[in-house]
């Protein structure tokens, strides 16, 4: 619905038609859903008087009795009924509040008919959330949240650190020996039991140099309130034995939360108790401070500060414990591009030595993120880590290159993955993603073909019905040398490369119909929702190109689909020379 009032504010519609507004004042308001009825609906700030004025204007434009041609009369009747339907919703304070808060989906939620009509917006919002919760509860048994991790460790030290004389006489001794020396597989699924209870089943298998083991865990989590939850964990494994654990989370204040955990691990050596306590606090909008204490086999006290902004992520952590104590600092820079590229670096030093790690992360498809990092440390050596995250599944491949810090290993670990990625990205990923986008776009066009044809017919009908009003508006504007729309096109124009043909629709008449007092104002929303408009290229970027005359001077402007536009403007003037 995009209009039952111009001073009456902005209006939204599923077909996103009509944007004829009534009063001279223009108000900038938040747009509503475009999905309620096929024609105009009003935004939050329109008064009842503004609504009625806009309704009368639209009724005069689309009243069936004003047209003698049977086809025009039929089309006018459809548009008139849609305007009336929108007016009924907006005239009802209860229905209008629901729509202002939630759009069409709010009115479609079952149960409003039994809700008391004399309610405040806050009470209606609370009731809507309750009805939505009841709807979600009916789906609880069908929902799971599978998560999995597969890690494959590769020992490739023979590539950079080998004794050639020991292999000269051995068959195949000329080829480096690369082997998989460890693997780890873990998987978990969630099963909602009630609206507040969730069961999580998880298991893992690990092997290292021919020795391995596994475990299985069952966790039941209960949300006790909006401020906290608790969970009980039961586990068993073939090495460590049964496990019983308890974990509690609590929001102490709006800026501080607390997590407490304790457990009993039963092993052949006896019972091993453990306990941990962590508290965190928001230091500012982007910064968190953490303090953690652990008691058990690896007792330690850890404090850290984490700052996460739109462009960077910084972590500083200090741990004092047995057997490990360390100081760690990490920085990650986030590029503001479509692939969400991130570059990171960290330094970690402690009793065990010093480790320098650097790497990059990049989104390669809608659900996949690829990252690579190089870890250089003493005495750990050089390790290349490649990680692929696909939806909720993670695949990790750590390649241990040397036990010492060798410049050749650092160089190849840094340059090698970069060259391989650039080749794969150009030869495989880009063609694949482009083909996928084209396929999705084609499916979208086919699925919406009927709807587009309907909207096109509605737009053409609206244009026919506007002709008389536009004639009067042009006569009035010409008499005072006001705003005359000479040409207006909406859609996708020819690209610079000329690879795609233009797909545009002539919207000269609809825009002239929106002119009032020598002004035309379009708010921040897709222009496909304006009366007389439709989307000629679904799923593609669109623009509006205008050529207009004001006070006898030519003007021209191009605006993107959702860009707000106000004309006339001095900056749109076309110089006489051009």
Image (cartoon, helix red, strand yellow):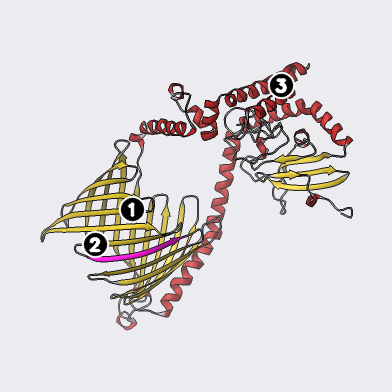
Residue 239's image quarter? bottom left
Q: Secondary structure at mark 2?
A: strand
Q: Residue beneath label 2, please?
A: 294
Q: In this view of the protein, which residue sits in the foreground, 350 or 285?
A: 285
Circle number at residue 189:
none
Q: Residues within 10 Å of mark 3 (few under 14, many from 20)?
A: many
Q: Nearer the viewer, mark 3 or mark 1?
A: 1
Q: Nearer the viewer, mark 2 or mark 1?
A: 1
Question: Magenta segment, principal secondary structure?
Answer: strand
Q: Nearer the viewer, mark 3 or mark 2?
A: 2
* Left or right relative to 316: residue 337: right
Residue 181's image quarter? bottom left
> Which residue is drawn at the image coordinates 76% and 25% (left, top)?
465
* Left or right relative to 25: residue 308: left
Q: CA distance from mark 3 to mark 2?
A: 74 Å
Is 56 colored magenta in this rendering?
no
Residue 557 x %, y %: 76, 48
Q: Which segment is the magenta one?
A: 298-308
Q: Secondary structure at mark 3?
A: helix
Q: Residue beneath label 1, please?
A: 257
The reply to whether callout 3 and callout 1 are in contact (CB within 8 Å) is: no
Q: In this view of the protein, which residue sits in the foreground, 559 or 514?
A: 514
In the figure, 127 relative to 353: above or below? above
Q: Please tell me which of labels 3 and 1 falls first in the chain.
A: 3
Residue 86 x %, y %: 61, 25
Q: Residue beneath label 3, please?
A: 76
Residue 225 x %, y %: 32, 41
């Amino acid at each position: 619905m995009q209009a039952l009032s111009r001073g009456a504010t902005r209006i939204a519609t599923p077909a996103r038609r009509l944007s004829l507004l009534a009063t001279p004042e223009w108000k900038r308001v938040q747009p509503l859903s475009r999905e309620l009825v096929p024609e105009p609906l009003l935004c939050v700030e329109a008064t009842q008087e503004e609504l009625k004025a806009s309704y009368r204007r639209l009724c005069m434009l689309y009243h069936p009795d004003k047209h003698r041609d049977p086809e025009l009369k039929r089309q006018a009747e459809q548009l008139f009924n849609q305007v009336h339907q929108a007016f009924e919703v907006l005239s009802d304070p209860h229905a209008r509040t629901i729509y202002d808060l939630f759009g069409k989906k709010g009115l479609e939620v079952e149960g409003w008919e039994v809700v008391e009509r004399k309610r405040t917006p806050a009470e209606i919002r609370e009731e809507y959330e309750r009805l939505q919760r009841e709807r979600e509860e009916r789906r609880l048994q069908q929902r799971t949240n599978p998560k999995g991790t597969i890690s494959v460790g590769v020992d490739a030290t023979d590539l950079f650190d080998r004794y050639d004389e020991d292999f000269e006489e051995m068959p195949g001794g000329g080829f480096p020996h690369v082997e998989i020396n460890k693997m780890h597989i873990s998987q978990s699924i969630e099963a909602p039991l009630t609206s507040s209870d969730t069961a999580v089943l998880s298991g893992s298998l690990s092997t290292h140099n021919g020795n391995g083991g596994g475990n299985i865990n069952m966790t039941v989590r209960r949300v006790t309130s909006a401020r906290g939850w608790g969970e009980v964990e039961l586990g068993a494994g073939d090495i460590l034995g049964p496990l019983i654990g308890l974990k509690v989370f609590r929001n102490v204040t709006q800026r501080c939360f607390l997590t407490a955990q304790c457990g009993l691990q039963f092993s052949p050596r006896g019972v091993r108790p453990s306990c941990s306590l962590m508290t965190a606090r928001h230091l500012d909008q982007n910064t968190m401070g953490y303090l953690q204490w652990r008691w058990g086999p690896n007792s330690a006290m850890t404090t850290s500060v984490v700052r996460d902004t739109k462009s960077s992520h910084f972590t500083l952590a200090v741990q004092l414990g047995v057997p490990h104590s360390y100081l760690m600092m990490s920085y990650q820079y986030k590029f503001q591009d479509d692939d969400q590229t991130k570059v990171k670096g960290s330094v970690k030093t402690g009793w065990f030595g010093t480790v320098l790690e650097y790497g990059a992360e990049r989104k390669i498809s809608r659900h996949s993120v690829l990252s690579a990092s190089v870890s250089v440390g003493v005495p750990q050596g050089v390790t290349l880590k490649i990680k692929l995250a696909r939806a909720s599944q993670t695949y990790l491949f750590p390649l241990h290159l040397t036990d010492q810090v060798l410049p050749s290993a650092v160089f190849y670990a840094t340059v090698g993955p970069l060259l391989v990625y650039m080749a794969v990205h150009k030869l495989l990923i880009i063609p694949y993603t482009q083909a996928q986008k084209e396929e999705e776009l084609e499916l979208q066009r086919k699925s919406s073909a009927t709807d587009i044809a309907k909207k096109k017919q509605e737009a053409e009908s609206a244009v026919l019905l506007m002709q008389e009003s536009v004639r009067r508006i042009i006569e009035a504007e010409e008499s005072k040398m006001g705003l005359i729309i000479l040409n207006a096109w909406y859609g996708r124009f020819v690209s610079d490369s000329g690879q795609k043909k233009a797909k545009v629709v002539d919207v000269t008449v609809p825009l002239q119909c929106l002119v009032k007092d020598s002004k035309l104002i379009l708010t921040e929303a897709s222009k496909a929702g304006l009366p007389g408009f439709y989307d000629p290229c679904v799923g593609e970027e669109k623009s509006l190109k205008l050529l207009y005359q004001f006070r006898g001077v030519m003007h021209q402007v191009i605006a993107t689909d959702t860009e707000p536009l106000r004309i006339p403007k001095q900056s749109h003037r076309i110089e006489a020379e051009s």
